[in-house]
Image (cartoon, helix red, strand yellow):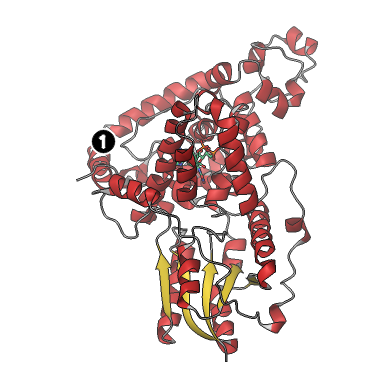
Amino acid sequence: MQFINVVWLKRDLRLTDHAPLYSAIEEGSPVLLLYLYEPMLLNDPHYDERHWRFVWQSLEDIDRQLRKFNTQVLVLNSSAINAFSTLMTQFTIKHVYSHQEIGLKNTFERDKSISALLKEKDIKWFEFQTGAVKRGLKNRKNWDRDWQDFMRKPVLTPNLEQANWCTLPIESEKKWDIPYTWQTKARGIQTGGSELAWRTLEDFFDQRAFAYARSISKPEASRSACSRLSPYLAWGNISIREIYQAALKHWKTPGLRRNLIAFISRLHWHCHFIQKFESECAMEHRPVNIAYLDYPYEKQSHSIHFVKAWQQGNTGIVLVDACMRALIQTGYLNFRMRAMLVSFLTHHLNVDWREGIAHLARLFLDFEPGIHYPQFQMQAGVTGSNTIRIYNPVKQAQEHDPEGVFIYKWLPELRTIPVPLLFEPHTLTTMEAMMYNIAPDSIYLNPIIDLESAAAIARERLWSYRKRLDVKKEAARILSMHVKER
Ligand SMILES: Cc1cc2nc3c(=O)[nH]c(=O)nc-3n(C[C@H](O)[C@H](O)[C@H](O)COP(=O)(O)OP(=O)(O)OC[C@H]3O[C@@H](n4cnc5c(N)ncnc54)[C@H](O)[C@@H]3O)c2cc1C
């Protein structure tokens, strides 16, 4: 049987700055690139067809680059354990190479069983650090300095010409029957692949970044002025180091400096949040501040209709609904609007954060467990260590969408209402509602809650809970583990 090295692609779907592929090629044995569509993840509530389509587009992009080497990625629809067991019947696997996956508990458990299987067969598995995130870290000593060092190191680009590519097993030459809906582009949703990641990056630095800092909070302008690199980073079409180094090349461009400072600080946050999740992954199932386990949320039986209205963008609060509908259609929202959706769910509606987290994960094309969980909990106010923010959706709309461009786009049924009335249609008189052609039973005349009183109750509930001794004790522990350098 042929000796091979397997490079197991996960959320690192690229051929550049790729330490596992680099090392596998250097080792010299024939290289097999493997990607697994695992039923466990296909059925996981955090994922949606939009993610798998993006992955498929990314794999197609890799295959296009590999065509001249007469090889392609072996794509299987299989559990990892079955895939590796089958490969072992067709090849003698010398080594397995991959990046460490900072993922959900199910992928961590899967990795443990693969590790056991490979150990049993005496196959060495080389796992490489993902970005600047360190496995098993218990405090942040020197973390910032190490982040800088990592970002400044030369990228590790594999020499594809030099690679000894493996001949794929005959029966896999015809790829698994990929669902048709993954093979067609989705209108309004970003398309996957390294080529597009690089085009997005270049276009950002050449044109869009000049408006970055001033547009970052605006729901409409941010869609073009922010980098839009998040799905490419989440699925690994480009590495964070490649982006960082590209940003530095533009450091002296007149008019960019302030924007680049803001942008680079976010690249730092990217790893900072993933590191939090890596260091305390139990937050997938419980609040990072364990004292919030008893937080007095609405009972699930009461909150069910609130959750449904929020999920469908049908709460009667215009900016909340516009954001949710934009997200459903496009897979993207800027940071502030994501934070506002969580704040509305968990503060105004007093719904347990666990009832909303998978819904947003499914909708965010850039779903990254290590950012999503800590950010969601932070906005839900269950860390005890961050400033509590209750976003007022009316004020947010007035400040960041003053002409109503974003709201009109996503709630066309309100196009007849002029600003500033648009922001609070429930204040329209019966005559005005008739004049603007708004049906008397419209949710926008009778929103699911009264914003002001719900916010006042939430404020009292959040601040009084925060004074608890157990909350403070946990907050101190969180700060010393995840934030303070020692
Ligand atoms: C509740 C909630 C959930 C979120 N879930 C995710 C998620 O699953 N995946 C994800 O990539 N981002 C998530 N974010 C962070 C942020 O909203 C997105 O990274 C950003 O909006 C992506 O757009 P961009 O690429 O144009 O960002 P840019 O502003 O251009 O930033 C560049 C990159 O920096 C990183 N970044 C930017 N803002 C943040 C931030 N606040 N925290 C951590 N990293 C950041 C991202 O990788 C981003 O691509 C979440 C934020 C909130 C409030």
Q: Estimate how packed mark 1 is, as few (under 14), some (14 to 19) or many (20 or more) residues with alpha carbons within 10 Å.
A: few
Q: From where the camera sits, is residue 297 visible?
A: no
Query: Where does residue 267 sit, x and y in percent of width and height?
Result: 44, 42
Query: Where does residue 272 sit, x and y in percent of width and height?
Result: 37, 45
Q: Is the N terminus in the top left, top right, bottom left or bottom right quadrant? A: bottom right
- Please tell me whether residue 308 is drawn above or below residue 63 in the rendered image: above
- Tell me where residue 90 sits by quadrant: bottom right
According to the picture, the residue beneath numbered tag 1 turns out to be 468
In the picture, measured across the screen, residue 141 lies left or right of residue 52, that is left
Residue drawn at x 43%, y 53% is 284
Determine if the C-beta at disc 1 is less than 8 A from ligand 1.
no
- Please tell me whether residue 181 is drawn above or below residue 116 in the rendered image: above
- Who is closer to the viewer here, 323 or 291? 323
Which SS class for mark 1?
Answer: loop
Q: Amino acid at mark 1?
A: Arg
Residue drawn at x 58%, y 71% is 33
Q: From where the camera sits, is residue 241 visible?
A: yes
Q: Of all residues shown, which one is farthest toward the left?
A: 486
In the picture, measured across the screen, residue 382 lies left or right of residue 333, that is left
